[in-house]
Image (cartoon, helix red, strand yellow):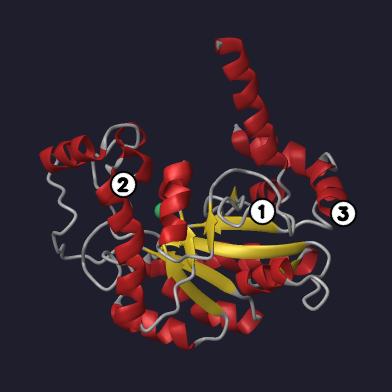
């Protein structure tokens, strides 16, 4: 059903209009998680043809001093969340196409055989995202999940893979908490530890310079923004759909999710922002009707 809608939207001319008018002077940031190699080849090639892919650092530099660091039209920043092991398979493609990307890692899952809780079999992730952190962990324990258990199959990038990716000038590694809790469901101490210790761990273990943060599941509030600043980060990414300018609050940067899609119609529509904006209008309308 969605696929047909993506097709209709793609050929409606709206994505073209958005790209050439709305996106031209603004910075679009897209979020992926575990896109497959064939899907990545298709998406990256499309983006290379229709946008100017820039690094997160290019954007941050332009925010600091626009006169020195001018951005090209239709600038697009590519980001990956979590640090899935499949990201490593994209390295040759990234180098072949010379595409800068930023990956946000869960410091206590990468380099181990620990699992992402939301991928655990039988886990009702949508529901668990809405409960207090301790309750989420209790419910996960009931279905046999523990965040510190070392499983036989690895889900995240290994230490070796991180070291290899780090050597590429095209790859920038940043933080996405320790274990990927929903920060807004955590007590103060736990939330700050997830934000702060993940930065320290990634810096110490992999000699990285951690300045960026991505809020897990895009959940954050004023408390999380303050904690991210206190921990010494310079910017943070949300999953709020929208475009960015040089004036956008660096701790509330907007992103469009492209959902690891293999469908080009979907990639075109989602990257243009048409989908994310339509969804937020529908959400706004339903919350107006509710109240
Ligand atoms: Zn995530």
Which of the pair 236/173 is nearer the observer?
A: 236
Q: Measured along the vertical axis of the image, is residue 32 above or below residue 7?
A: below
Q: Residue at point 26% right, 65% down?
A: 108
For the residues labelled 2 and 1, say whether their Cβ atoms are less than 8 Å apart.
no
Q: Residues within 10 Å of mark 1 (few under 14, many from 20)?
A: some
Give SS at disc 1: helix
Give SS at disc 2: helix
Is 14 left, or right, of 167 in this rendering? right
Give the x, y percent position of residue 22.
83, 49
Is 18 left, or right, of 190 in this rendering? right
Which of the pair 172/4 is nearer the observer?
A: 172
Among the 4 quarters of the image, the one containing residue 194: bottom left
Asked whether mark 1 and ligand 1 are closer than 8 Å, the reply comes as no
- Which residue is at the far bottom? 167
Q: Please say whether residue 101 is visible from this viewpoint.
A: yes
Q: Which mark is residue 118?
A: 2
For the residues labelled 1 and 3, say whether their Cβ atoms are less than 8 Å apart.
no
Check disc 1 and report the residue beneath it.
Answer: 264
Q: Please say whether residue 6 is visible from this viewpoint.
A: no
Q: Quadrant of the N terminus?
A: top right
Cα separation between marks 1 and 3: 19 Å
Check disc 3 and report the residue beneath it.
Answer: 20
- Chain-order first, disc 3 or disc 2: 3
Q: Measured along the vertical axis of the image, is residue 245 above or below residue 208?
A: above
Give the x, y percent position of residue 117.
26, 49
Viewer-nearest of discs 1 and 3:
3
């Amino acid at each position: 059903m969605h696929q047909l809608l993506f097709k209709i939207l793609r050929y409606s001319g709206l994505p073209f209009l958005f790209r050439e008018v709305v996106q031209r002077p603004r910075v679009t940031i897209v979020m992926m998680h575990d896109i497959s190699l064939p899907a990545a080849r298709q998406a990256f090639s499309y983006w290379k043809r229709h946008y100017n892919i820039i690094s997160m650092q290019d954007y941050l530099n332009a925010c600091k001093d626009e006169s020195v660091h001018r951005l090209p039209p239709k600038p697009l920043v590519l980001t990956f969340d979590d640090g899935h092991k499949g990201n490593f398979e994209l390295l040759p493609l990234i180098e072949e196409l010379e595409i800068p990307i930023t990956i946000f890692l869960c410091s206590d899952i990468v380099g181990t055989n620990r699992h992402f809780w939301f991928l655990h079999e039988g886990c009702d992730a949508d529901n668990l995202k809405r409960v207090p952190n301790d309750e989420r962990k209790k419910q996960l324990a009931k279905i046999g999940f523990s965040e510190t258990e070392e499983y036989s199959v690895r889900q995240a990038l290994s230490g070796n893979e991180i070291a290899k990716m780090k050597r590429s000038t095209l790859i920038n590694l940043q933080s996405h908490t320790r274990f990927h809790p929903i920060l807004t469901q955590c007590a103060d101490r736990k939330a700050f530890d997830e934000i702060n210790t993940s930065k320290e761990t990634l810096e110490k273990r992999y000699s990285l310079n951690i300045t960026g943060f991505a809020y897990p599941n895009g959940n954050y509030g004023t408390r999380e923004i303050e904690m991210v600043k206190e921990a010494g980060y310079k910017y943070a990414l949300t999953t709020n759909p929208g475009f960015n300018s040089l004036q956008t609050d660096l701790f509330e940067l907007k992103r469009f999710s492209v959902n690891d899609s293999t469908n080009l119609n979907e990639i075109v529509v989602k990257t243009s922002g048409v989908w994310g904006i339509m969804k937020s209008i529908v959400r706004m309308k339903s919350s107006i009707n509710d109240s």
